[in-house]
Image (cartoon, grey):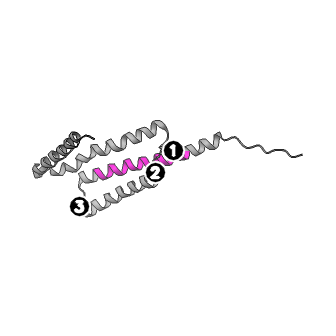
Amino acid sequence: PSVAKMILVVLVFTSVALISYALPAEYQYMLPLTNLPMLFLSKCPQIYTNFVNQQTGQLSLPTTFLTFAGSLARIFTTIQDVGYDAALLCNCTANATLSWVLVIQILMYSILSKYQSDKTKSPKKGKKHM
């Protein structure tokens, strides 16, 4: 990336931080919701691509499952530490749901690919010995 792009990114994040700091207290509950667009933009294209290609490519089941498990843990720790904060729980639940969809896709498409590869293999014919 060029220096100009890096400066632009720093300026954007600085302005968001300053706006967030200056936000009146009655609207600060909405700040966690600003993460939702990035969450959807990061996972939905992957889910769609997996669906279209009918495979998950190089996605790792352990890594994706741990992301899902971490999201579930975050839901429970949010409830324990903060209470039923709708904005935080919305983020955690959306992340857990999208991660679960990816886990299901990995499992489903790996089983499907094994089934199709077993189906296309022709049985080996033994040679007759005389």
Distance of mark 1 from mark 3, alpha carbons? 38 Å
Instruction: Name the residue that disc number 1 marks.
Output: 109
Q: Are the two marked residues, 2 and 1, in contact with CB atoms closer than 8 angstroms?
A: no
What is the span of residues highlighted in magenta in the rendered image? 91-111
Q: Is residue 29 shown left or right of residue 91?
A: left
- In the rendering, at what x and y percent does residue 56 appear? 47, 43
Q: Are marks 2 and 3 in contact (CB under 8 Å)?
A: no
- Main secondary structure found in the magenta portion: helix
- Which label's residue is closer to the chain start, 1 or 3? 3
Q: Nearer the viewer, residue 27 or 86?
A: 27
Q: For mark 3, what is the residue?
A: 82
- Tag 3's secondary structure? loop
Q: Residue at x 19, y 49 (%)?
A: 31
> Real-space Cα distance between discs 2 and 1?
12 Å
* Residue farthest front in this picture: 3
Query: In this view of the protein, which residue sits in the foreground, 87 or 46?
Result: 46
* Residue 29 against residue 120 in the figure, above or below: below
Secondary structure beneath label 2: loop
Quarter of the image holding residue 117?
top right
Q: Secondary structure at mark 1?
A: helix
Q: Amino acid at mark 1?
A: Tyr
Residue type, numbered disc 3 = Val
Residue found 41% across the figure and 50% down from its top: 100
Local crowd size for mark 1, using a 10 Å CA cut-off: few (<14), some (14–19), many (≥20): some
Numbered tag placed on residue 61 in the rendering: none
Mark linked to residue 60: 2
Instruction: Based on the picture, tell me whether residue 32 belongs to the magenta stretch.
Output: no
Q: Is residue 41 above or below residue 88?
A: above
**Circle 3: is it few (<14), some (14-19), or many (20+) Cα within 10 Å?**
few
Quadrant for residue 69, please give it: bottom left
Q: Residue at x 36, y 44 (%)?
A: 43
